[in-house]
Amino acid sequence: MKQLEPTIENQSIAGTVDPVGIIELLNAFAPSFFVAFMVTLLVTPLVRKLAIALDVVDQPGGRKIHTEPIAYLGGLAVFVGIMAGVLSAAFVEAPLDQYRPVPISVVFGLIVIFITGVGDDMFGWDPRLKIAGQMMAAAALAVESVGVQVAAGVLNPLLGAGDTQLFFFPGVDWVLSSHVYSIVGTGLVAVMVLGGCNSANLIDGLDGLLSGVTGIALIGLALIGMMLLPEVGGDSVEAPQSLAVARIVLAVVGLGAILGFLPHNFNPASIFLGDAGSLMLGYLVVSIILMLGDRGQTHVVLAGLMVFTLPILDTFMAIVRRRLSGKRMSDPDSDHIHHQLKRALGGVKPAVLTLYAIAAFFATLGVVLAWLDVSTELRGRVVYAGALVVFSSIVTYAIKVARRRALSQQAS
């Protein structure tokens, strides 16, 4: 693993790059977006035929809303589209070629997660194998220090270092060593990868839901990434070896692939993402969020998490609900947010469109918090306060709903 410096976003960075304007950015990213979009759009019908030929289909019954077998392996089409988009981005001319490309560790992690999901879709892998695959993908990020530097932004405010100090403990400077950052950062990466992959997997319960919610999140993350670039986000100029462009490339090609897949996946769906797609999209979003903290900008990482609040909220509510009812986490139920909205609104489309609106609200909130951090003097304190209010409200709401549900089940 690379040695980390115990610094945050205000560290002195050796080397700068020429400023990049918004028009240049759009022109540079457009080809990769369209490559990912067109490849996924055209490959998806072929993947559907392959899935049917291999009998990799989701049979109706139980909690499922479809009445006929639906092809799995949609994740394969999205994977091919993302890889094509990332490859095309490697041929982008200046001004973006002066920045660091998409890290090999992220691409390797996407491949590992995809293989893990396909294995489960086709052979019903043991959950422990799925966790092992996710841990391998997280380890790849940690080896190349992708996201590990976020630990600096987490520990510094808590222990009294850096510009944004939440607490102050004198005499603990010796704790803030590169080894501590590496250990804590690696653990943080592992937790976020596990959480992101499984949050995406849990919310993938209605036609087009995860695809659309992830697409909205990627729009928010792309906007946040652009704010951090010169001229677009202010007077900050990131070093040539930063991940300033790599995170935007991933967001843009991911969005293109999702938009190419969504026409086949929206209700009534002809193909599902499967675990290959849901785990991969969760990993993609988490990787981008971690890359926002390339220089320890924990404030911006929190804003990125805000963009992905809906899957996080659903997962937290599921944990609390199953805990209170005495069920195992692996036990499925029909009380996820999307199930409740489907029952309340009387159909899949109204429920999905409502959740799109909720996802857009959280994405907008995350972008606004990132803008406040980048463009105002308030910086991290606003983001910390905003994140605290939103997530504490989510926790309170989740516990209330879970308790009410548990009491109603006991009464019946």
Image (cartoon, rainbow, N blue to C red):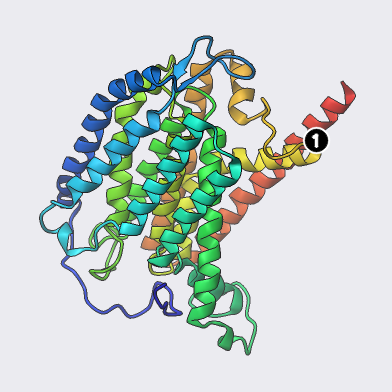
Which x, y percent locates residue 260? 29, 29
Which x, y percent locates residue 254? 33, 41
Q: Nearer the viewer, residue 9 or 385?
A: 9
Report how many numbered discs are placed on residues in the image: 1
In what element is the residue under mark 1? helix
Q: Nearer the viewer, residue 301 or 279?
A: 279
Query: On the picture, is 200 further left or further right than 218?
Result: right
The type of residue carrying mark 1 is Ser
Counting other residues with Cα less than 10 Å from the Cα at mark 1, is it few (<14), some (14-19), or many (20 or more)?
A: some
State the residue at coordinates (36%, 54%): 106
> Which image quarter holds the C terminus?
top right
Query: On the picture, is 123 further left or further right than 313?
Result: left
Which x, y percent locates residue 45? 30, 20
State the residue at coordinates (23%, 25%): 42
Q: Which residue is mark 1?
A: 325
Q: Quadrant of residue 258?
A: top left
Query: On the picture, is 242 further left or further right than 207?
Result: left
Q: Nearer the viewer, residue 115 or 259?
A: 115
The answer to whether residue 115 shows anywhere in this view is: yes
Instruction: Look at the picture and state if 402 lies above or below 239.
Output: above
Instruction: Look at the picture and state if 6 lies above or below 269.
Output: below
Which x, y percent locates residue 57? 46, 20
State the residue at coordinates (78%, 30%): 405
Q: Quadrant of residue 166?
A: bottom right
- In the image, farthest residue toward the top: 67
- In the image, farthest residue toward the right: 411
> Which image quarter holds the N terminus?
bottom left
Instruction: Look at the picture and state if 50 lies above or below 256.
Output: above
